[in-house]
Image: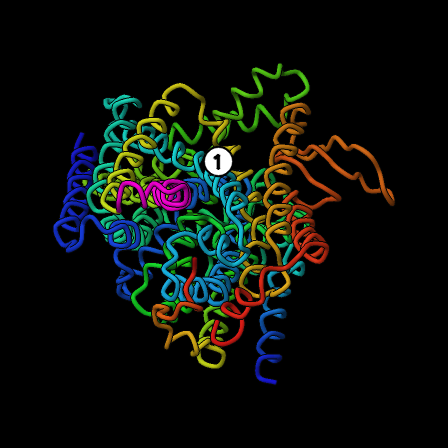
Amino acid sequence: MIPAIVVFVYLASVLYIGIFAFRRSAQRDKAEDYFLAGRSLGVVVFLLSLFGTNMTAFALLGSSGHAFGNGIVTYGLMASSSALIVPLSLFFIGTRMWALGKKYGFMTPVQMFRDRWECGHIGTVITIVQAVLLIPYIIIGVMGGGTTMNAISGGRIPFWVGGAIVAMVVMSYVFFGGMRGTAWVNAFQTTLFLLFGAIALGVIGAGMGGFGKAVSELASSPATSALLTRERVSPLYFFSYTFIPLSSICFPHIIIFCLTAERVQHFKKTVILYPLCMLAIWLPAVFLGVTANRAVEVPAIQAKLEARKTLATQSATLSPEQKTELRAKAAGDDILVRLLEHYAPLWLVGLLGAGIMAAVMASDSQILALSTMFTEDIFAFYEGKTRFGEAAQVRTGHIFVILITVIAYVIALRWPQSIFDLAVQFAFSGYSALMPLLVGALFWKRSTKWGALAVTLWAAASVIAVAVFQSIVSAPTPGAEVGFGSLFGQAIISRTAAGTSVFGFLPVVPMVIISALLMIVVSLLTAKPSEQTIRRYFRQTI
Amino acid sequence: MKGLWLALLVIVLYALHQDIWFWRTAQPVIFGFLPIGLFYHVCYTLAVCLVMWLLVKLAWPSQLESIEPSATEEDTAP
């Protein structure tokens, strides 16, 4: 129970930070103050919070779990590619969005799109697609809270209670503290998991008798030696993954967060230090995930390894239900918690559990982003602000925060997590396919609202198409593929154990390329915005 | 010209992410515990940090630093 008590202390601290931020707010009924912290965040909070906002439960727990099953390739797939693409996006797009927000008062990307392309309802379509792609993350966050509380308390706190506690805490500090509270909490959380990542690595490494021993044992066993190489994925698959981080800047909570910096210079340190933060979090997470394959003295991990072995050796004789059950048993999303339970002293498990909880609670900024989008892109745009005033707009934002949290909690209790895990995977590709919106608006004078609509509809349609394809064609055993169509001896579209591939690439590659082509072709075929608007965006500074 | 060199540097860095040369081997194991494929990407991340520093030093959009809220009618977003 000690770890659970430590986690409760942590949750209380987080709540206090949110309430403290509320007290520090001088203009509580001003939309810009509540949703963007008055565009006043300092450089340290901006860097730590932006990084924390990007590091979801998936980053910490999912990366260890992925590394447990796939090996060191996880770092190259997800960490080093993001370490390059995310800072580049912040450098080229984040800074320009910040400047436009400061100049014209934009609080969401859709406000900028509406102004830049002289459109109204097309902006609403973009808002809806962005919101639908974001909702699974919030649900996953609530589920992660319930699962982690349950695991840390040794099963004493049921999933529904754990989920409710985490949802209540997140809702409270977002409700009271708005962006300022969320940013401060995120900065605090990032500090925690930067610190605890290193501690976890040391403690578990010592418990396992040193990482050198673990790696040498992994290398000498034919069953695990491939985990130390990247032979389990193809180079095309590896290349495809570099398109996934394009989604980062397209997530509403990230691009909205770019508007909160007090000065554009705050981006400088963020751009430079972001790769180091990636290294500090992901290297321990991935390394622990890989070496967990030698932690056979941990009963829960031994059970996972046995489930994996059964899947690999008896797949032909297993029913689909048995395979699903075994896959769930072999999954490694709780691998960090299991390692900590076994190797760390109880008080440390609590502290490290708090670090894990910090990552799980990244849904705060997504809840706030949805609230900002609803109040700015829908409520204010359709005259709500004019009719009822700014204070009513902020109150609407508050109510929306409660509503979205309650809905996410109810869904989290009723639906299996696997559905939302899958939805999150699709959402990454969907947001990557929305990248031409930002690039077109900021860097291409000739881009039009019709090009933007084509991009948005394509992103939504392609996500749905991949989801339908994967639900119709069941996954083959690992290593096998079910191909459809053929061109130059290569299957056009294939169902693989991990998902779908198009000409050997992940679907995100054609999704982004076609999206960019649609922006170019449709824009060239349709009328551009007025010269006055184009001049405002391109004549001088931005 | 400076911009062109920096663009080229970023493209080369992107290409270097696709390190097919260490694909199927874990050897050598650096410091006794880091397989070469993982060590390469750790070094890669540090190299990215260096290139970002160069971008900030040499290609920072300094024109954005003087941005102020728009005041004129023509310049105001609807």
Q: Where does the image place residue A256, in percent across and percent down from the top left?
A: 39, 53
Does A5 sit left or right of A191 as displayed?
Answer: left
Occupied quadrant, residue A296: top left
Which amino acid does the dot numbered 1 rest on? Val
Occupied quadrant, residue A100: bottom left
- Residue A450 included in the magenta stretch of the image: no
In the rendered view, would you say B50 is above or below A514? below
- Residue A402 appears in view: yes
Does A1 sit left or right of A77 as displayed?
Answer: left
Residue A30 or residue A260, whichever sits in front: A30
Q: Where does the image place residue B34, in percent across and percent down from the top left?
A: 48, 57
Q: Residue at x 73, y 35 (%)?
A: A494
Residue B34 or residue A209, whichever sits in front: B34
In the rendered view, would you say A63 is above or below A41? above
Q: Where does the image place residue A241, in percent across and percent down from the top left?
A: 59, 50
Q: Residue at x 65, y 44 (%)?
A: A506
Q: How is the image coloured?
A: rainbow
Magenta residues?
A369-389
Occupied quadrant, residue A191: bottom left
- Residue A382 included in the magenta stretch of the image: yes
In the rendered view, would you say A60 is above or below B41? above
Provide the secondary structure element on which disc 1 rests: helix
For mark 1, what is the residue? A132
Does A83 sit left or right of A440 as displayed?
Answer: left
- Residue A208 appears in view: no
Mark 1 is surrounded, within 10 Å at the Cα level, by few (under 14), some (14 to 19) or many (20 or more) other residues, namely few
